[in-house]
Image (cartoon, rainbow, N blue to C red):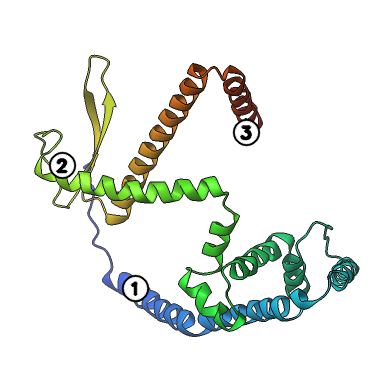
């Protein structure tokens, strides 16, 4: 009895019917993004703009006593609706929770966005276009909640990434090394995964050919991030050495203890 497997050709009708259905769904998705999705975003921006107008045109013009009274009133009404709110909540967050009747995280995010608009001097009429230019609600929230040191690091990574790209372009003319290998594809880049050799150098253990642009960009960002982290560690080391040389042993010890406490907390 033969063990030879019989090759069965794929059914063209099966493939074409599913592809046709996916084309229809893709068209619906495109229409949804151009109409319903966009309309939903426009309506959300309009509501948030109205919240911003209420804050700028009414709340900020009130006296301190009026503001305190309004906050108490909002807290009582929110609690009556079963919405948990704390006294330390910002007025913007409470306005968002009252209007949207949403969970704390969502309302807090909307509060961040309105607060960012206030800090940038954005008026209610400018709000919607400003949000779009910033990349949308989620992007503003992401940037707003980040700590100053996190934002500074992001800026540093973005700056160094340009240097990394420049170094790659220079290395294309003067390569760091040349490896004779077959089957590396025809794309612009190929990723070689190497493992450090205990005797020196490295051993290539895998290859990824025809690397797409998104992966190249991700690798550039990771290289830039590593360079920033190395530079920061070196700067901190120099700072510690300088402090000790200047006789500020107490300051160096306190800084070390603070770092250890942060690491223990993170663990």
How far apart, in angstroms, are the residues tagged by discs 2 and 1?
43 Å
Determine which of the numbered discs, if any, sits on residue 19 in the image. 1
- Discs 3, 2 touching: Cβ within 8 Å: no
How many C-alpha atoms fall within 10 Å of the one at disc 1: few (<14), some, or many (≥20)?
few
Q: Earlier in the sequence, mark 3 or mark 2?
A: 2
Q: Earlier in the sequence, mark 2 or mark 1?
A: 1
At 75% from the left edge and 69% from the top edge, which residue is drawn? 97
State the image quarter where residue 184 is shown. top left
* Residue of label 2: 171
**Nearest to viewer (mark 2 / mark 1):** 2
At 86% from the left edge and 67% from the top edge, which residue is drawn? 68
- Residue 222 spot, x, y in % from top left: 37, 43
- Residue 72 spot, x, y in % from top left: 89, 67
How many C-alpha atoms fall within 10 Å of the one at disc 3: few (<14), some, or many (≥20)?
few
- Discs 2, 1 touching: Cβ within 8 Å: no
* Residue of label 3: 266
Side of 21 where 72 appears, left or right: right
Determine which of the numbered discs, if any, sits on residue 122 in the image. none
At 20% from the left edge and 48% from the top edge, which residue is drawn? 189
Q: Secondary structure at mark 3?
A: helix
How far apart, in angstroms, are the residues tagged by discs 1 and 3?
49 Å
């Amino acid at each position: 009895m033969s063990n030879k497997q019989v090759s069965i050709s794929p059914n063209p009708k099966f493939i074409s019917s599913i592809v046709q259905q996916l084309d229809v769904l893709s068209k619906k998705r495109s229409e949804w993004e151009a109409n319903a999705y966009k309309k939903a975003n426009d309506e959300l921006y309009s509501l948030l703009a109205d919240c911003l107008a209420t804050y700028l045109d009414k709340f900020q013009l009130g006296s301190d006593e009026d503001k305190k009274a309004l906050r108490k009133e909002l807290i009582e009404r929110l609690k009556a609706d079963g919405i948990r709110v704390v006294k330390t909540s910002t007025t913007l967050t409470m306005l968002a929770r009252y209007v949207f009747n949403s969970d704390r995280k969502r309302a807090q995010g909307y509060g961040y966005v309105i607060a960012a608009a206030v800090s940038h001097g954005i008026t209610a009429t400018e709000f919607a276009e400003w949000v779009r230019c910033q990349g949308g609600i989620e992007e503003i929230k992401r940037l707003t909640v980040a700590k100053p040191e996190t934002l500074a690091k992001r800026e540093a990574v973005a700056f160094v990434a340009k240097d990394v790209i420049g170094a790659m372009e220079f290395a294309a003319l003067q390569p760091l090394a040349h490896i004779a290998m077959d089957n590396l594809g025809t794309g612009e880049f190929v990723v070689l995964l190497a493992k450090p050799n205990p005797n020196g150098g490295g051993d290539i253990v895998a290859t990824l050919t025809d690397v797409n642009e998104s992966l190249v960009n991700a690798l550039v960002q990771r290289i830039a991030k590593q360079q920033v982290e190395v530079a920061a560690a070196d700067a901190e080391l120099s700072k510690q050495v300088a402090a000790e040389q200047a006789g500020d042993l107490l300051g160096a010890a306190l800084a070390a203890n603070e770092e250890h406490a942060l690491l223990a907390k993170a663990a």
